[in-house]
Image: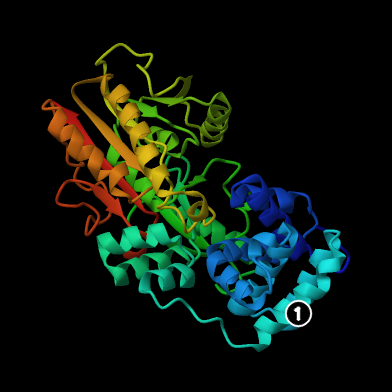
């Protein structure tokens, strides 16, 4: 979608959304590709494109509800570029300060640029109707209403309401719809949180964006992990000072907490399902003498190796293997194992809003069975006295606490292993009475993770 009458920001956003919907691509990857095709785009336009893509995905069900009420035909009958242009415009009308005439005009132009000029009048009429008319009534049922209002699938809303109650389920949905900050894990072997913070601020001032924090990056320490920095108002991470030198890696605080739980200074750690490598590199920086990063994808392991080289983490060694079957290590020989299992990703909806529309309840069950296979294979490598840390970026019980309960019931040689003292800045509200690390976007302001540690007696 490109036209001289369409801004670069909206053209990039429309292209990224098209790839997300048509190709089932991840939003971040699609956005990065769309921006790369427009290298001269102003940083402010790039930031607007990012907001339009992620915002449209976060509120997609609510946007579709408004469009369906104003249209005279089912949404599934609309051509995809038409539907995406409508979603982009309604998001701008409802959630941004973009002038209404600009939002409407450019969405009409997007349709023309896609070669569907015959639909321009239809798009204009629908948007004018939404702009001037009353909001479409929401469903009367509380769960249906929450699903539409906060744009989360009904099955997921119902599941959360059953576990947490309706009001906390609403709080979780609202937290998922708030933009997540860029979170860095400082490479403590090459910098420190204080030094990197100062460098970010100095660069901002030198480039004429500071010291006014409203004009330059705002950098604050993380709440839970000592090496975490939250950065707002910055450009892409690769453009930040210190990136080329390996001073930091992008990693949410919840993932950093898992790495702190699995830390084994002076020892070898097996990291199962290691790609994209954040925890493997973190373990090396925390003092592991060797980190065996195992993954089934050689291509993904190539990215792990690239990151390890950038960060100077020479302790990381990559091994290609299928974690569902016996692993290529001598039985019961490893004292530290991390299983960062493939999961539904439902704890990361702040950063990956498109995932909520792709997952089903059946996926949770299917992935739980896969996780159990991987756990069983990893446990066969664990030496007596060794500790296995298991983690998923999901809050669903089948993917976390159910596995711990099953292991303790079926394996009398396993017991819960508490984390080392001082592993986090504060442990308040992070660890359950059952020994689970459980983080939530609405309770802790970080991604949703579940993790546990078991020791083989």
Q: Specify whether 164 is left or right of 242.
A: left
Tell me what residue is drawn at x 41 percent, y 41 percent: 343
Q: Specify whether 346 is left or right of 267.
A: right
Query: Looking at the rendering, which quadrant does residue 158 occupy?
Result: bottom left
Q: Vertically, is 255 above or below 57? A: above
- Quadrant (top left, top right, bottom left, bottom right) of the C terminus: top left
Q: Specify whether 428 is left or right of 211.
A: left
Q: Vertically, is 311 above or below 131? A: above
Q: Vertically, is 132 above or below 234? A: below
Q: Where residue 351 appears, x then y in whole percent?
A: 50, 55
Q: Where residue 252 appears, x then y in whole percent?
A: 43, 51
Tell me what residue is drawn at x 10 percent, y 27 percent: 412
Tell me what residue is drawn at x 50 percent, y 46 percent: 248
Q: Vertically, is 37 above or below 208? A: above
Residue 217 visible in rendering: no
Q: Nearer the viewer, residue 306 or 38?
A: 38
Q: Where residue 440 appears, x then y in whole percent?
A: 33, 58
Residue 159 visible in rendering: yes
**Element at badge 1?**
helix
The residue indicated by pointer 1 is: 125
Tell me what residue is drawn at x 39 percent, y 28 percent: 272
Query: Looking at the rendering, which quadrant does residue 74 occupy?
Result: bottom right
Q: Nearer the viewer, residue 69 or 291?
A: 69
Residue sitting at the far front: 73
Q: Nearer the viewer, residue 369 or 1?
A: 369
């Amino acid at each position: 979608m490109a036209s001289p009458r369409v801004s670069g920001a909206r053209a990039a956003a429309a292209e990224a959304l098209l790839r997300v919907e048509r190709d089932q691509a991840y939003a971040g990857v699609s956005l990065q590709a769309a921006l790369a095709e427009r290298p001269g785009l102003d940083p402010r336009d790039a930031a607007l494109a990012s907001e339009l893509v992620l915002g449209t995905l976060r509120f997609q069900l609510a946007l579709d509800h408004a469009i369906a009420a104003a249209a005279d035909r089912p949404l599934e009958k609309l051509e995809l570029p038409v539907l995406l242009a409508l979603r982009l415009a309604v998001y701008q009308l409802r959630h941004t300060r973009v002038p209404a005439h600009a939002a409407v005009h450019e969405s009409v132009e997007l349709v023309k640029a896609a070669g569907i000029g015959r639909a321009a009048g239809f798009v204009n009429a629908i948007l004018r109707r939404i702009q001037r008319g009353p909001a479409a009534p929401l469903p009367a049922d509380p769960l249906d209403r929450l699903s539409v209002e906060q744009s989360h699938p009904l099955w997921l809303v119902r599941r959360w309401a059953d576990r947490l109650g309706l009001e906390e389920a609403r709080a979780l949905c609202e937290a998922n719809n708030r933009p997540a900050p860029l979170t860095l894990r400082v490479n403590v072997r090459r910098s420190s949180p204080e030094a990197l913070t100062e460098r970010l601020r100095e660069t901002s001032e030198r480039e004429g964006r500071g010291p006014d924090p409203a004009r330059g990056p705002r950098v604050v320490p993380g709440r839970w992990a000592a090496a975490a920095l939250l950065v707002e108002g910055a450009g892409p991470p690769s453009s930040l000072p210190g990136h080329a030198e390996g001073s930091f890696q992008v990693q949410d605080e919840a993932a950093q907490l898992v790495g702190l739980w699995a830390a084994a200074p002076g020892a070898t750690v097996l990291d199962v399902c290691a790609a994209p490598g954040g925890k493997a590199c973190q373990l090396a920086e925390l003092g592991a003498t060797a980190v065996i990063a195992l993954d089934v994808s050689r291509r993904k392991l190539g990215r792990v190796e690239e990151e390890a080289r950038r960060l100077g983490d020479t302790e990381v060694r990559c091994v290609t293997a299928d974690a569902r079957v016996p692993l290529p290590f001598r039985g019961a020989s490893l004292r530290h194992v991390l299983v960062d299992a493939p999961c539904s990703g439902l704890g990361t909806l702040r950063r990956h809003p498109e995932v909520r529309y792709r997952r089903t309840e059946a996926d949770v069950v299917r992935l739980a069975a896969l996780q159990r296979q991987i756990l069983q294979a990893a446990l066969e490598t664990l030496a007596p006295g060794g500790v296995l840390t298991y983690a998923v970026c999901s809050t669903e019980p089948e993917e976390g606490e159910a596995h711990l309960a099953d292991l303790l019931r079926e394996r009398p040689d396993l017991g819960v292993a508490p984390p080392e003292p001082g592993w986090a800045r504060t442990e308040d509200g992070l660890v359950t009475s059952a020994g689970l690390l459980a983080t939530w976007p609405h309770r802790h302001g970080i991604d949703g993770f579940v993790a546990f540690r078991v020791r083989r007696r």
